[in-house]
Amino acid sequence: MTSTKTSPGRAGTGWRTFLRRRTEGRAVVLLLIVAVIVLISQPAVFESYGVTLSLVALDGLVALGLTLVILQGELDLSVGSVLAASGAVMALNDNLALGIVLALLVGIAVGLLNAFLVVVVGVNSFIATLGTLFAVRGLAFVFTNGAPVSIKDLEAGIAFGQPVLGPLTPRVLIFIAAFAVLQVFLTRARAGREFYAVGGNRQAAADAGLPVKRRLVAGFVLCGFVAAGAGVINTLELTSANPTAGSTVLLAGIAAAVIGGVVLNGGRGSLIGTLIGALALGILQVALDFAGVAPEFKDILVGAVLFLAVTTDPGSLKIVRNRVRAAFAGARERREALNEPA
Amino acid sequence: MNNNTAFEARPRELRGTPAARPDMRRQVLKAAGSYGIFIVAALVVVISSIAVSGFATGQNVIAILNQASAIGIVAVGMTFVVISANYIDLSVVAQVAISAVCVMAVGTSTNVFIGFLAGLGACLLYGLVNGIAIGILRANAVVVTLGTNGVGLGLLSWLTKGTIFYGKPDGFTAAFGRSVVWVVPAAALVLLVIAAIGSFLLSRTVFGFSLRSLGSNREASRLVGVKVGGVVTGAFLVSSVCSALAGLVLASFSNTAVSTMSSGYDFSALAAVIVGGNSLFGGKGSVPRTLIGVILIAVVENILVLIGLPFAWQQLVTGSIIVAAVAIDAASRKAGL
């Protein structure tokens, strides 16, 4: 145990405690491993970092919203469907600006619906958002009549895909901006910091007088809004809205958050961790693409990474370590008992 | 002398007063919750036979039962997972598809039995991996099965590249898919057998009892000596076996297998389990309830098709039904029923 020469009042304020409390350790380790491997085998990934960042931007955006919800101890499975539905709403509108506004409103509406089901009706968030996942996906199909719909303003869509700042496309800039805003909200705004309390111990938060329900609503609405934003970006860049869009963002988003150290029960984690996790996943996926690996393999990879991440979180490992210790201790005691002189 | 060992159900002052009557209301609500679903199911069937044309024909009944069987077998397995408070096994989609493809791909060249064994082996491996991750490593069931599902489907589509596998036109699967006893297809008979076995497992074995107690209160069960890891793994293994069988049944319907044929099965199975009255929070429920839910969902889906509702709207309706069912479940939980 490190002993720091501090008075009791200042114990726990040193940089060591700060580091020990951080949850992003695993994400940083993974990112370093991935970066080293990819640097050796496919350095092109880093040279054309614009492509990598573009991939990270979409999955990462959804992951940011998901993090907000997971931090409160809930889940939002409907993000992929919201992406598709909002994209459809935008494409069906002749006026681009109006379309974007309506699309974002769709995201907010779904977020409110999820919040209503979870907070007011008391349905478990997983099942509520699973229901919304199918219902909103159905809506996307209804809006588009089952076929992809092109946006009316093709030039805007093409322009959106052009690099604006160096090799960075607007998609990446939006992602950076969203990350900055949400990070400030989560760490500096009181409402944001209360997200952690709601997730850590909801009963205690309620007893302490925090507006738990309002925070939960805020979390779901923000997640839906961000997912709708991702839908707008996706539709603009592809210049068409496909009702089947967004089928992979859920897995990638949860994977990024879990890798980043966000605890699924809520209360611990950070957006920075999610960002690092999204980066690691994105670099890995792009490297696989450059290496010519089949696209299905990416799904396998993300699924496998998610599985590994969720089973090797510190909590589970501690359980396993204690079990192993108990097994060995028991064996040793039995051996000693047998060797004792009768 | 005061008889201190007697238990007074209600203080003398309150008997016969309005305070005593809420009991009756609670009893009625409780009965409605427990048996209501059977009444609803019966009503739906009766009304549809009269109102919806084409519903009450033998052809349609066979279609309903076929539809119900594949999902129903998966739902029986899912019941075990739900009752143990593990919410859902999202990997059934991958498992059913893997089993169907194994039966068709391997079975056509060699023997259906060997094909099924291959599929069963893969599914059991799945169940083991899920069970260990969720039961022993205590990871979140939803996320773990989401991950394993992604891995499985990705592997399947990578290995098969979307090819359709055809079964022998005169083989076992073709015959199985065609055979009907009066209006009951062979698949429905399989479902009944599986449901009977599952019901026995759940209600009359130590394993089933441990499962239900785990669902009610995990900590208490662990303290009492229930082997949490083993029981949860068992639940996911049961789900895997059911998925493997469902894959065989599904492949027999069309005598083909594609990697995408099982999409939506996770949701439909869960819908059947919940609508039937099993509690999503675990501890309460039984296999017969799941059967009722399966029939009801299959009937509703059939009606939606018969009245010509576009496919997109059907998803909307089924999604809303399941949300409504869970809302009722949650509300009754809150009321302490």
Image: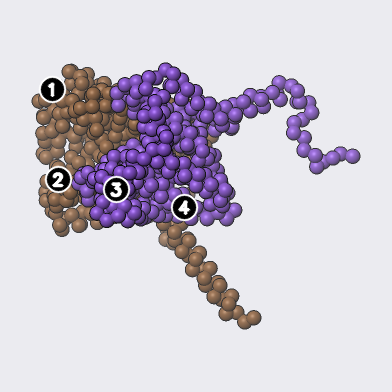
Chain colours: A brown, B purple
Name which of mark 2 and mark 1 comes first in the sequence: 2
Q: Is residue A116 visible?
A: yes
**Same-subunit check for callouts 1 and 4:** no
Q: Residue A6's mark?
A: none
The answer to whether the residues at label 2 and label 1 have Cβ atoms under 8 Å apart is: no
Label 4: which secondary element:
helix
State how far apart marks 1 and 4 are (Cα). 56 Å
**Same-subunit check for callouts 2 and 1:** yes
Tell which of A78 and A319 is nearer to you. A78
Which amino acid does the dot numbered 1 rest on?
Asp
Quickly name the residue at label 1: A153
State how far apart marks 1 and 3 are (Cα). 55 Å
What residue is at 53 percent from the left and 68 percent from the top? A330
The answer to whether the residues at label 4 and label 3 have Cβ atoms under 8 Å apart is: no
Could you classify mark 4 by the number of other residues whose Cα lies within 10 Å: few (under 14), some (14-19), or many (20 or more)?
many
Residue B267 x/y as whole percent? 38, 36
Position of the N terminus of chain A, as image quadrant, is bottom left
The answer to whether the residues at label 2 and label 3 have Cβ atoms under 8 Å apart is: no
Which amino acid does the dot numbered 2 rest on?
Tyr
Tell which of A62 and A147 is nearer to you. A147
Could you classify mark 2 by the number of other residues whose Cα lies within 10 Å: few (under 14), some (14-19), or many (20 or more)?
some
Chain holding disc 2: A
Quickly name the residue at label 2: A49
Which amino acid does the dot numbered 3 rest on?
Gly
What residue is at 34 percent from the left and 52 percent from the top? B116
Residue A249 x/y as whole percent? 27, 39
The answer to whether the residues at label 2 and label 4 have Cβ atoms under 8 Å apart is: no
